Image: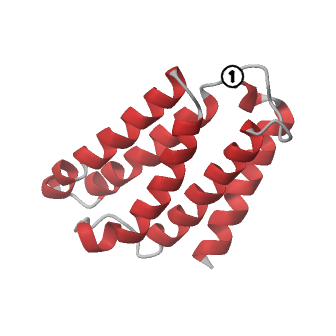
Amino acid sequence: MEYAIGVGLAALVGLFLWGVGLDKDRAAYPVILIVIAILYELFAVLGGSTTALVSELLPTTIFIGVSVLGFRTSLWWVVAGLVGHGVYDIFHPALFTNPGVPVWWPMFCMAYDVVAGVFLAWRLMPSGGVKAGFA
């Protein structure tokens, strides 16, 4: 169920951004990646774990860096960041102890991230098409 909701939500968000033209702004998907990256920090705060908060800082910083790099150079970096965060979600429970993370979160987030990355990749392709703002 977590996977289906993640896939569906990412598809709906992507279609919404496309439908209203928000994805023509180069910042749309980089901002989404930044928000995705900081959610494990939020869960650490919710779980009351300073240890988790500190241990989550390095990966969060890396994904934010990829987001900024993608915004400033090529949105293909953001595609890589979104899909990479999806892979990270798969391994997160084995790498970190974060008491605030819901049990279902890594599966949901992985599905969302990968679909969002694929959707952005499709939009970057000439046939998917956004030329204005996406160069």
User: Image quadrant of residue 130?
Assistant: top right
Locate the C terminus by quadrant.
top right
Give the camera-side residue of 25 and 118.
Answer: 118
Q: Residue at x 31, y 49 (%)?
A: 41
Residue highlighted by disc 1: 135
Going by the picture, which residue comes out furthest to the bottom? 1
Q: Residue at x 59, y 26 (%)?
A: 27
Residue 111 picture quarter: bottom right
Whether 115 is drawn above or below 75: the answer is below
Residue in the image at 18% along x and 53% along y: 55
Residue 49 x/y as whole percent: 18, 58
Which amino acid type is shown beneath numbered disc 1? Ala
Q: Position of residue 131 (x, y in %)?
A: 79, 24
Q: Nearer the viewer, residue 55 or 53?
A: 55
What colour scheme governs how the chains and residues are painted in the rendered image of this protein? secondary structure
| Residue 65 locus on image (x, y percent) | 37, 33
Task: Label 1, secondary structure: give it.
Answer: loop
